[in-house]
Image (cartoon, rainbow, N blue to C red):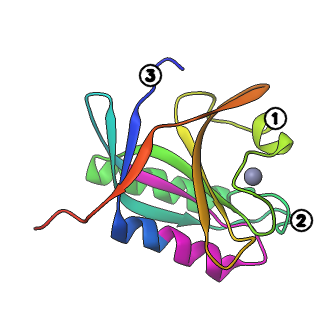
Amino acid sequence: MPNPYRLVIPRSVYEGMIRHARQDFPAESCGLLGGRFDGNQANAEQYYPLVNVADDATRRYQADIRSLLAVHRALREVGQREVAVVHSHPHSPAVPSRMDLTQNAYGDAVVHLIISLRSSRPEVQVWWLLPDQFVPADWRVVDDPTK
Ligand SMILES: [Zn+2]
């Protein structure tokens, strides 16, 4: 990875992502985490849900292009960058699928966060995706910053 960073997610943002994954179940949910880089750490600040328009949305995801463009515009307006690509696996583990590797439009510039809902307790893992392998990323959930 050219810039391997650590992803830090405030608890409220983390919970919003899980909520969206549960709402979209049994389809895969997808979204982006926006935030800011501080050295080799990426601080997530907001979760931006996207609309999964894949025909077989229970097995893969494809973000609706209009919602994707709207999120990119919103990121620019608040000065955030994309710090993670998020999607859910309704029935399989939080491990990248073959398709996640082959259809990864982001290369190794950004981490992928996968939420598995196969058991009652969501399982979350974060990965760097390479064309033929995946590497665990450094990440953690923190208490929300006090304002
Ligand atoms: Zn996947």
What residue do we see at 60% from left, 40% from top?
A: 127
Q: Residues within 10 Å of mark 2 (few under 14, many from 20)?
A: few
What residue do we see at 18% from left, 62% from top?
A: 145
Query: In this orientation, which residue lies closer to the viewer: 43 or 50?
Result: 43
Confirm whether the magenta stretch covers residue 48: no
Vertical placement of residue 7 versus 26, above or below: above
List x then y, in percent, for residue 84: 50, 46
Q: Residues within 10 Å of mark 3 (few under 14, many from 20)?
A: few
List x then y, in percent, for residue 81: 38, 43
Q: Please, what is the three-letter code of the amino acid marked with disc 1?
A: Thr
Q: Please, what is the three-letter code of the amino acid marked with disc 2?
A: Asp
Say which quadrant the C terminus sits in. Answer: bottom left
List x then y, in percent, for residue 38: 24, 35
Mark 1, residue position: 102
**Of the numbered discs in the image, which one, if any, rests on residue 56?**
2
Mark 3, residue position: 3
Q: Please report contact status of discs 3 and 2: CB closer than 8 Å, yes or no.
A: no
Q: Residues within 10 Å of mark 1 (few under 14, many from 20)?
A: few
- SS of the residue at dot 2? loop
- What's the magenta region? 17-34
List x then y, in percent, for residue 69: 54, 53
Separation of marks 3 and 2 at Cα, in angstroms? 33 Å
